[in-house]
Image (cartoon, helix red, strand yellow):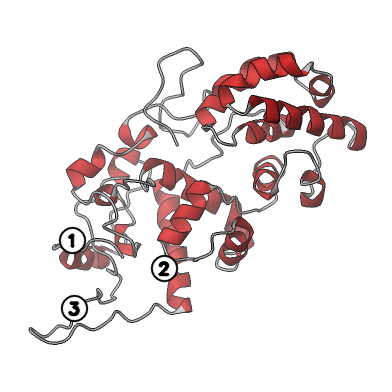
Amino acid sequence: MGEQASNGARNAKQRGKSGKGATQTGNPAKAAVPGGAAGPGSRGQAASGGSGKRGGPAKPAKPESRLAMVRRARRINRELAEVYPYAHPELDFRNPFELLVATVLSAQTTDLRVNQTTPALFAKYPAPEDMAAAPPEELEAIIRPTGFFRAKAKSLIGLSTALRDDFGGEVPGRLKDLVSLPGVGRKTAFVVLGNAFGVPGITVDTHFGRLVRRWKWTEQEDPEKVEAEIAAIFPKSEWTMLSHRVIFHGRRICHSRRPACGACPIAPLCPSYGEGETDPEKAKKLLKYEMGGYPGQRLNPPPDYPGKPAPALGEPAARETG
């Protein structure tokens, strides 16, 4: 799949000798930009359309076996762990309730916009009991910047009421309880479980689904089917951090419309290399957040985050977000 770069095979062969591709640990600016872009199928697989004999018929590439795909997927995860050792949920929160509310608000908007909105929200409604009693129009006014504010306000009041009445004002730590709350689906539940309770889970958002299909880990479109197929590839202990790494990569390098293939540290492992910009210098200009020298999405990022904090609401915005 994707465009064949004329120098792909040579660069892939050189990367294969190094054993680590272009990944460099701990320096996002360097880790994001390999010395040269490797072509698709560079892990020893023949590119489709080449026969090896001048004038001979083209031979189709040999289909990747299940075992080979699993090995490639796990190596991608290891490479991403070196590129993004600081990967984390990009929503600001101090407790399970704040994470739950922020995740509900993040639907159809950016984490940056949510993070710019929640300080005022939690200052006024810090606990489920407070938010359950909030006048809808006042809550709507605060969360209006996140979009779909009427529906979101209804969900927040509903889930806060349920937490107050059914769970003693505490966010439950079980999947079946979380998905019983208004406005809470499996994706939101796994974000909360993985990051507030330490319960492993796979978060299938738009970035995660796009990348795992681009990498040929699955062909499924339904989030629950994607979740099941990816869960079968990786040990349970990796699920939460895998989700963070994949989402980080999708937001910073492997964009939907124009992925920065020429600046991708896992290009030798990607069967879709060439869908985006393959020129390294042009690809570097497509990098976002800390990879491109721009602020991140959190106003209060973790201590090990190498980028700049996001601006507060009303301050100049960071580069386009995802």
Residue 125 located left or right of residue 25 = right
Tell me if mark 1 has few (under 14), some (14-19) or many (20+) residues whose alpha carbon lies within 10 angstroms of its own. Answer: some
Report the residue marked by disc 2: 72
Helix, strand or loop for disc 3: loop
For marks 1 and 2, give the one nearer the viewer: 1
Q: Amino acid at mark 3?
A: Gly
In front: 259, or 292? 259
Tell me if mark 3 has few (under 14), some (14-19) or many (20+) residues whose alpha carbon lies within 10 angstroms of its own. Answer: some
Q: Amino acid at mark 2?
A: Arg
Q: Quadrant of residue 287?
A: top left
Q: Position of residue 161 (x, y in %)?
A: 85, 30
> Looking at the rendering, in which quadrant would you find the C terminus?
top left
> Looking at the rendering, in which quadrant would you find the N terminus?
bottom left
Image point 56% across, 39% down: which residue? 89
Query: Is residue 302 in view?
Result: no
Helix, strand or loop for disc 1: loop
Q: Amino acid at mark 1?
A: Ala
> Who comes first in sequence, dot 3 or dot 1?
1
Disc number for residue 299: none
Report the residue marked by disc 3: 50
> Who comes first in sequence, dot 1 or dot 2?
1
Image point 25% across, 77% down: which residue? 46
Helix, strand or loop for disc 2: helix
Report the residue marked by disc 1: 5
Query: Is residue 119 in view?
Result: yes
